[in-house]
Amino acid sequence: MAKKSAASNKSFGAILAVVGVVGVAAITFVTSRPAKTIVLDPATLPRVAASGILKGNPDAPVQVIEFADFECPGCGHFAAITGPDVMSRLVATGEIAFRFYDLPLDMHLNAVPAHNAAHCANEQGKFWEMAELIFAGQFEWNTQATRNPKKVFEGYATRVGLDKAQWNDCYDSERMLPQILANREEATRLRVTSTPTFIIGGTMVSGAIPYDEFRQYVLAAKARQDSSAAPAGR
């Protein structure tokens, strides 16, 4: 009788163990499964014209375009190291107009959500403030860090003073994806394949170049303009 009882207890204990393992597995699956993936699908998104986000005087003598991926480490490096000097010493002084164009790369799974978050901040006039936080916080939300980057972006939205309800509605509706896709397709049209890539007064430059080199390209563009504007000699 005692042997039967012991066997029964062992069987019951084994059942509990199996139930426990299954329960833990189920909880792990629920908590670790990825959030909804945001992708750019040309087959389903409406077509719009490419249009960058402008910083500075649109009539500045030198026009600059950056094609960037928010999850690209090189783009983050440029934004942190060179970007502040470009903005304060070239954009703020009226020497250049700077436009940001989206180029989220397929290898970066959280890039499109990041661009979506920034464009939804732009809807409230806070693109550049949001972009600064997104670049600086890459380690918090990139593909290696999380499967649900929106939680991190929500924190940034609060920090830059956005209307959270409006930002969430924009983010979840994905109404900014056609613009992001159009900007990425503009990169394809211009044969831009890496990030960051700059077009400085018509000259294409790849890589997170330092400020002094960036400024040399600006000066060369101005010199070309001055030369073409000068009257022909007799």
Image (tube, rainbow, N blue to C red):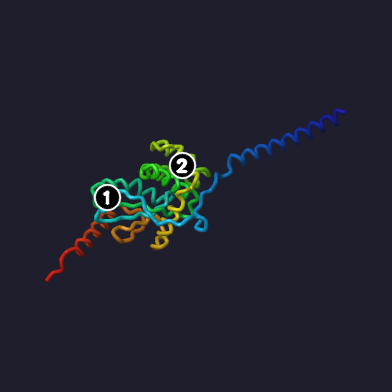
Query: Is 226 placed above or below 177 here?
Result: below
Three-letter amino acid code of the residue under disc 1: Asn
Q: Residue under circle 1?
A: 57
- Quarter holding the C terminus? bottom left
Q: Position of residue 228 (x, y in %)?
A: 21, 65
Residue farthest along the bottom direction in this orientation: 234
Left-right relation of 154 to 232: right
Q: Position of residue 37 (x, y in %)?
A: 53, 48
Q: Position of residue 63 (x, y in %)?
A: 29, 56
Separation of marks 2 and 1 at Cα, in angstroms: 33 Å
Mark 2 vs 1: CB contact within 8 A: no
Residue farthest along the left direction in this orientation: 234
Three-letter amino acid code of the residue under disc 2: Glu
Query: Looking at the image, is mark 2 or mark 1 earlier in the sequence?
Result: 1
Residue farthest along the top direction in this orientation: 2
Is any atom of residue 6 visible in this view?
yes
Question: Callout 1 environment at 10 Å: few (<14), some (14 to 19), or many (20+)?
Answer: some
Question: Residue 175 or 39: which is nearer the viewer?
Answer: 175
Is any atom of residue 82 visible in this view?
no
Q: Place residue 25 in its image quadrant.
A: top right
- Quarter holding the N terminus? top right
The residue shown at (41%, 45%) is: 118
Question: Callout 2 environment at 10 Å: few (<14), some (14 to 19), or many (20+)?
Answer: some
Which numbered dot is residue 140? Answer: 2
Which label lies toward us, 2 or 1? 1
The residue shown at (25%, 59%) is: 221
Left-right relation of 220 to 69: left
The residue shown at (33%, 47%) is: 81
